[in-house]
Amino acid sequence: MTLAAMWVHDGAVCAIADSAVTLYEPGRSGPTSVGQKREESSFRVDEAVLKLMPIGKVAVVAGAGRGSSVEAFAHHLRSFLQDRMPFHRAIHSAHRRALDTDLPGAEWDALVGTFNGDSPQILHCGTDDRGRVFEVRPQFGFIGSARDLLGPGLLDGLQKSNGSPSSITTSAQAFVYRELAQDAGLFDNGIGGPVFAGALHQDGFHWQPDTMIAFCTDELFENLRGPRSPAPDWMLDLVFVGVRDDVGFCFSTYLSRGKGHAVVRAFHNRLTESPFSWYQKWEPMLGRATRNPDRVIFLHRTRPGICILRDLHSGSPVFALGEGGRCALHPALVQFVDQGLRVAPGETVDVRWASALA
């Protein structure tokens, strides 16, 4: 159960994946990092894994299905390439090695973004109910349980979008976060948690810039225009998503509310360094990082509007956090964001981009 997609854009392979996995025992209770509610039926689903795995500078793997099989495939692919095996031979050898160690009946899928000469390429391998799968996906690949639920909308949005691979991928993240916020059943289907993304270029895989997702209500903007500013925390939730050393991390007010301290959750896989080593290195810097996102995605909790701010390192803060979890939006941004989110259900949604405080 997964959302994982890759597509070719402007000479790069863009990739996106959620972090939800199915457990063999009950997981956490309470909301997810992005505010999804867990019903009793979804207690065996948790946000736990970084599903994008860069392989040196030559490839990136995204997986769905049995996670240990996907990670074994990525691990073998990296090992064979480190031994200087040609890429075409390495990917087939890794595929066979992963299949040899699978449990009977295990099903998994992996998308592999790479380059064939100067041309970006997407490969699909894994298993299905008929056995081994290996095929080339020319421009777009989508695997996991979200393929039918979110695939058509995501593909439609990508076909209408313009801009750099990084901008297009941020728009794709915004689309997925909007769907997670407005469709309560997605987590029951194993889809959700922080969404990580990036793009493979000729010089390697580049993770998306640090991004803050702000989930807003109509009351937020009414409050900010009136005498009661700053707004109480229930009008706005903030989710910060970043990556350091190929390990994802997330700060979320959904997780920290009522605890009196910030909660930062990390997302690993078999190819990353040990959680203990990573925390030792990065924990002192995470709090500072979450206060300085490169981009902010504004979403309404019930309306379909999307508004994105970029180029945020201008010295002017987007948010001011006060006592008791209260939060104020920079006055210069209130009208721009409010207008961008006021889209009635059913209306065409255009992602609004702007440089911060421009």
Image (spheres, rainbow, N blue to C red):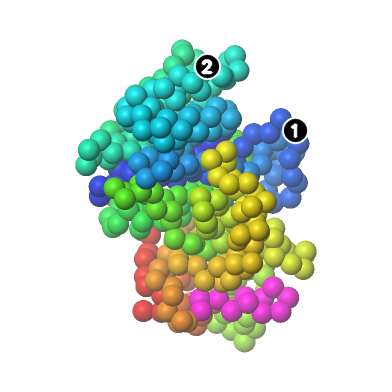
Q: Quadrant of the N terminus?
A: top right
Compared with residue 264, is residue 146 higher up or lower down, i.e. above or below? above
Q: Residues within 10 Å of mark 1 (few under 14, many from 20)?
A: few
Residue 277: image x %, image y %? Answer: 64, 52
Q: Three-letter amino acid code at disc 1?
A: Glu
**Residue 254, quarter of picture:** bottom right
Image position of 259 (left or right of 349): right
Q: Which residue is mark 1?
A: 25
Asked whether disc 1 touches disc 2, contact meaning CB atoms under 8 Å apart, the reply is no
Residue 323 covered by magenta stretch: yes
Q: Amino acid at mark 2?
A: Asp
In the rendering, which numbered label is found on residue 100? 2
Q: Do we see residue 236 in this rendering?
A: no
155 sits to left or right of 40: left
Which of the image's four quarters has the C terminus?
bottom left
Q: Is residue 182 left or right of residue 170?
A: right
Magenta run includes residue 245 = no
Q: Secondary structure at mark 1?
A: loop
